[in-house]
Image (tube, rainbow, N blue to C red):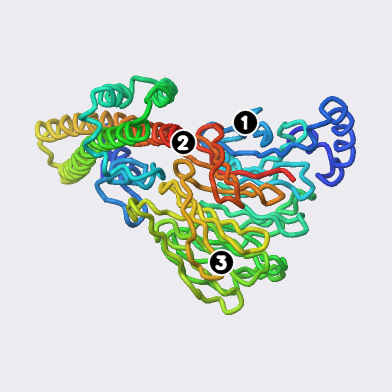
Amino acid sequence: MKPLPTMLMVATCALGMTMVALGAPPVRDPDWPCEQIKVSELSLGAVWAGPPVEPYADAWAQDKQVADLMGRLAQRRMPVEQAQAEITAFAQQAGEGRQAKLLALFAGLYATLDRERGSVMAGLDRIGRAQKDLAQSIRADMERLRTLQSAGESDEKQAGELAGRLGWETRIFEDRRQSLITACAVPSIIEQRLFALGRTVQRALE
Amino acid sequence: MRGRLGCAAGLATIRPTMALLAFSFVDVLFPARSQALTAYVSNERDNTISVVDLDAMKAVKTIDVGERPRGITLTRDGHFILLCASDDDTIQVIDTKTLKVVGNLPSGPDPETFALNAAGNLLYVSNENDSMVTVIDIDARKVMAEIPTGVEPEGMTVSPDGQTIVNTSETTNMAHFIDYKTRKVTANVLVDARPRIAMYRHDGTELWVSAELGGTVSVIDPVAHAVKRKIGFEVQGLRSDVIQPVGIRFTADDALAFVALGPANRVAVIDTKTYQVKDYLLVGQRVWQMDFTPDGKLLLTTNGLSNDISVIDVAALKVVKSIQVGRLPWGVVVAP
């Protein structure tokens, strides 16, 4: 058998990486493209040990001051330390309805960041499935090219087209893999923010 | 070998001189320091150790160490930190007075965690990538034995009488009992998926093994080599798949056990008589390992995702402080 061209070697490596990326402990979703263990949804109990916030699920949107603050705090461009300072300042000035306002604020943060995280997770799921499909396509094209070459009577034009397609597929696969390194960290970043802000709200309630 | 340790015959030889020197400088300049409690935290992502002053409740120094520091402990005399530098395939020795890396121990590949025997002269190391437990003589800095065990060895512990070594294996899902004298596996006990930590009660009557994916702790009779009880966890408002038990610690009287529940961000407090969970303390994100202060009054937890350690008041069962450390804190040990 002729040696595989360089591009196919790259493709082989890429498939190897797929197996690393998608390979996982037994209970993982096989399409999940991240190294991080998949946690589909946030759990309130993992970020909150204060008074019940369920009764305040809709309250935050009805209080303009709380809604405006929540909207700013939820945006990741505001540094966490600044967001925490704003919560502390808000608590100090909240007056009589302080507890209700703080609980409403956290209820709003939880709902908003949970929704944002859910959207990121759905995107990662889609990319994971697409990567898996692409890996299968690369594997099949490699096999076809190998068959063409080993038959010794390959159609040069056909083999060239196939090799060209493999090159593109491999490049797309690798680009996506690189993007995933950053994208896979986003759910954790959102969780970190929610946890840090939740902790500050709880302290303000004490 | 590097530094002082490389020139000396071993830790035992250099200890008295260095201890004397360190005493004269430190105690004259900082007389209160000997009273202070210090915690050392391995930061897996930063390749550092955070030195935490538990009186001031803050990190006061960062030590650069090898790649991917994970398991961390102290020699019995408290003079040296032993640290698994997993991706450097070595165990680093760090002087607690100078906070400098002063040598290495031959650990075998990818050391993740370890356990000291009661005498403090033998270190049992789990080598995650080659399914071995390596036994190291600390003073001689020599590998005494390599014991084949299950796939992906993880947790290590030694029975209080020093006669049994227990290793858990992540992929085989077992706790392996190894005889101290013959260095042979004498029993295997099946537990739930991905066992992490094994810990004996101080009285030696039970061995507890956490299963990260199984979400349980198996209570094992170490004589019969049988699981006598399984402890599950349930927290209101918490999805069951985020309950991933890892670290285990018993109070000195064995009355309470603390189990770190990973991404549940909680530490379960268990009554060891009834095996009932008394409380779930919200600590930090992805809580992993724990250690008590020597007086048993405080319990520290490493929280990998929130990059901090939590301080639990054991009597009050209350989280009293969070202290920022480096990125991805893995293990913690408190100096005596």
Residue occupied by mark 3:
B272
Query: Within 10 angstroms of label 2, few (less than 14), some, or many (20 or more) residues?
Result: many
In the rendered image of this protein, does residue B251 appear above or below residue A79? below
Residue ID at (27%, 22%) = A65
Asked whether disc 2 touches disc 1, contact meaning CB atoms under 8 Å apart, the reply is no
CB atoms at circles 3 and 1 under 8 Å apart? no
Q: CA distance from mark 2 to mark 1?
A: 15 Å
Please tell me which residue is depicted at 66% across the width and 28% down the height of the picture: B60
Q: Amino acid at mark 1?
A: Lys
Under circle 1, the secondary element is strand
The tag earlier along the polypeptide, 2 or 3, is 3
Report crowding for label 1: few under 14, some 14 to 19, many 20 or more residues within 10 A (C-alpha).
Answer: some
Please tell me in which quadrant of the rendered image residue A95 appears: top left
- What residue lies at 24% left-to-right and 47% top-to-bottom? A31
Mark closer to the observer (2, 3): 3
**Numbered mark located on residue B58 in the image:** 1
Q: Which residue is mark 2?
A: B306
The tally of labels here is 3
Q: Residue at x 52, y 57 (%)?
A: B269
Few, some or many residues within 10 Å of mark 3 (<14, 14–19, 20+): some
Visible in this render: residue B272? yes
Q: Nearer the viewer, residue A165 or B91?
A: B91
Residues marked 2 and 3 touching at CB (< 8 Å):
no
Q: Nearer the viewer, mark 2 or mark 1?
A: 1
Q: Position of residue B296 (x, y in %)?
A: 67, 52
Mark 1 or mark 2, which is nearer the start of the sequence? 1
Q: Are marks 2 and 1 on the same chain?
A: yes
